[in-house]
Image (cartoon, helix red, strand yellow):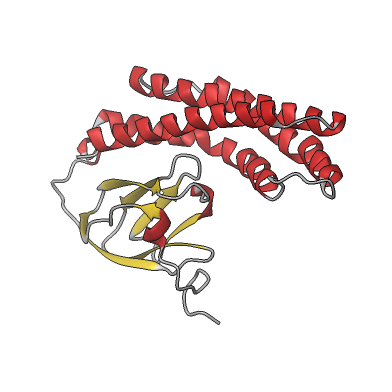
Amino acid sequence: MPATIFAASDNILSKDFSYSYPPTDMTVGEGVTIQFKKLSSGVSFNDLKAVSSDTSVVTLALNGTTGLLTLKAVGEGTAKITFGANGYADDVSYIDVISDDAYDDEEVLPAEILDLQDYADMLQPIEVYETNALTAYQKNMVVTASNRKTVYSTLTNVVIPNYKKVVNMVSKVKAPNAELQSIHALMVKGSQLQLEGFTLMQQAIYKKQSLTAANKKLEAGRTYINQYTTKLNAYVNKYNQ
């Protein structure tokens, strides 16, 4: 049995994801955000795990849609922070938290980062449907004569129903500021194109037609979503000083 909370592996997390380490010292009430970035096309933020060994010292929340990790120092002490994912070796760091009576909790983060945290909370309920849809799709990305019925069933019963919920919920999100609203519009467009692609694929499989149109629509959707991720990363880097 591995001694760590995630599966033991020789794979290094930083091979497929880039990220910064949390500070080694924090003050009670202080908050920090870390933005994960995908370095490989075959990985998902939903694969990531982040755990604090002592949530009375440091709490954290990882958004599987945006790859944004928020850490909050809530009490004095030391916490071990473990980043990982299935199939990757753990990446561990430690945070020492001290108190500061003069610390003003409301002035820790700029308004733009607080807006980003609120935005991430808005996206949180969407994750389960996105994960259900994309996990099922990724298992059936290659369509052959022998698996056409299985792929059609998966698209009809899992991928499309779950992704319809994603599109519906994403379209209703009102990002907290104009800059995030502009970025979020890319996600709205990308998810709509993805759903259109899944639907075209379903229809093409049923009619035994070419998947070219479906694949082009899916690629167009991925382009918008990649633009969304790039601009969101830039937003984090701009304000997370």
Quadrant position of residue 16: bottom left
Figure quadrant of the N terminus: bottom right
Residue at 43% across, 44% down: 67
Q: Residue at x 28, y 57 (%)?
A: 21
Considering only vertical position in the picture, is 96 above or below 181?
below
Camera-nearest residue between 46 and 9 = 9
Nearer to the camera, 97 or 237: 237
Task: Identify the residue at image location x=76%, y=37%.
Answer: 155
Task: Looking at this view, name the residue that lies furthest to the bottom.
Answer: 1
**Which x, y percent locates residue 22?**
27, 56
**Quadrant assignment for the C terminus:** top left
Count of marks placed on residues: 0
Estimate the x, y position of residue 153 in percent, counting from the top left.
83, 41
| Any part of residue 112 in sight | yes
Q: Position of residue 238 (x, y in %)?
A: 23, 33
Q: In the image, is 22 to the left or to the right of 212?
A: left
Can residue 166 be seen from the camera position used here? no
Percent coordinates x, y for residue 86 in the rendering:
54, 64
Q: Nearer the viewer, residue 139 or 178?
A: 139
Q: Is residue 100 left or right of residue 10?
A: left
Residue 170 position by quadrant: top right
**In the figure, 73 relative to 90: above or below?**
above
Query: Which residue appears farthest toward the left when viewing the image?
Result: 102
Looking at the image, residue 28 sits to the left or right of residue 165; the answer is left
> Camera-side residue: 77 or 155?
155
- Residue 108 shown left or right of residue 46 in the figure: left
Image quadrant where residue 90 sits: bottom left
Residue drawn at (76%, 40%), measured in percent from left and top? 158
Whether 88 is drawn above or below 147: the answer is below
